[in-house]
Amino acid sequence: MRALSAIVLILLCASAIAQDIAPLTAPENLLVSRVEGLQLAPATSRTWSTQDLLKLADALPAEQANALRRLVQGDSVPLAKAVTGFAFVTAEDNLRLAGRAGGIISLNQNTDFVFSLDTMRSLYEQRPLMPWVQTVQIRWYTSLGEWRIGQAPVRWGGGYSGAMLLSDNAPPLVHVDYRKDWHLGKRLGTWHFEQMAGIFEEDGSRRYLMARRLYRDLSPRWQIAFAEAFKANKLPDGLVAAATPFYLYQLAYAWWRYDNNDDWFNYLASVQASCRFASQRMYAEILLDDMQAPRWLTRYRYTVPRKSGVLVGYHARLPRGGQFALEVAHTDGNPGGGTYNFKNPQNRWTYRDAVLGHPVGVNRDMLWLRFDTPVGRHGYLAVEHVNTRMANASPEVSTGKGWTVYLYWLHTENYLAGICWQKSITRDDQQTRWLLQIGKIF
């Protein structure tokens, strides 16, 4: 891990952040199906960065191009209306209908309705708790900033395998999201601010989730971002939490109201960095979970174990719209606990059946590879590999490796046929799946 840490430090010294990767089920990814040569890419669960999506918009028909730019750039683009998707019949043990659809409908110049529906992800990942309604969201643009209200997956960061702080590894959240550009003068430049808040039920009681981040372009090549978040089973004076740094809010209320007990509040923070050069990108994210405060801030009464995570990645665009991505993720903490876990089980960094952060999970190292390319004029191939191992002596942590291969063929302009092959090897089991598929792009 020393070499990995050195790479991260080099990237951070360079000061940068990757553009966000659109959530897997976001309608942005579906609109790419209208780009010649990439019609079949969405069927392979491929995701795109916001910057690459804007470049692809130039190759789209006018209606879809306008919709894609509106989704990424907001009301600086004219009104948009576009719905797209695909569906197929798949055969494993039994026939099953699966697919994905999404789009945007501008209600007026200041309001958009955005939606996406998906049954593919639960099929591929065998997750029954993954809902088929992924996004139902109103986006409202005002002079004070942009509001996004409703249900949607959240993915903050540049990792194609997932993001460390908030990632669409978890099911979509019902939340409110606020975004605003802040100009802080000639020297500090313009920063983009985003804050989200959600409330949900878990194990019969209420949980509160808030996150915020600041990010900016340092140049056309470099970016940097800082983010913090928390999950809590109490939220005293919630407006105070919305208006102050979360770390200070935790210290103040743990001290004043809860007699130095902070197990009601799980705090995390992250720093993201990225550099783009030509058709390549390098990026990194460091996650701090339950970082240890200086002793004088806690009045010498308690300490918190250090837990952290890191993601380092490389991405290259290949000819004809292909891509190659390589990522390494690492989370480490005390055995039996670790990153994303918490001393109070109610506030573990989880939602439903998954962590809210990266799918590497607790106390694991992960190598992730993905290769996509068009094949001939009518085909598309994608190969994905993941390999995980324990980061320390954590016997309850599952490890193993897996392969997924997608091969699709476009028979006519809108009909497709293909195969998805999945192989998973763990310490206790080995599974192979073949899914034959025939479908239609609409």
Image: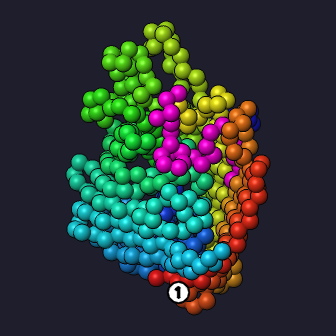
Residue located at (61% from left, 31% from top): 337
Would residue 151 be found to the left or right of residue 26 on screen? left
Colour setting: rainbow
- Toward which corner of the image does residue 308 lie, by quadrant? top right
Question: Residue 354: in sight, yes or no?
Answer: yes
Who is closer to the viewer here, 345 or 382? 345
* Residue 290 locus on image (x, y percent): 52, 28
Residue located at (44% from left, 55% from top): 172
Residue that mark 1 sits on: 414
Residue located at (32% from left, 49% from top): 176
Who is closer to the viewer here, 347 or 60? 347
* Residue 312 locus on image (x, y percent): 64, 45
Q: Is residue 138 above or below residue 175?
A: below
Query: Dot 1, crowdedness within 10 Å: few (<14), some or many (≥20)?
Result: few
User: Magenta stretch containing residue 279, yes or no?
Assistant: no
User: Magenta stretch containing residue 361, yes or no?
Assistant: yes
Numbered range of the magenta stretch: 343-368
* Residue 4 locus on image (x, y percent): 71, 38
Q: Is residue 170 above or below residue 233?
A: below
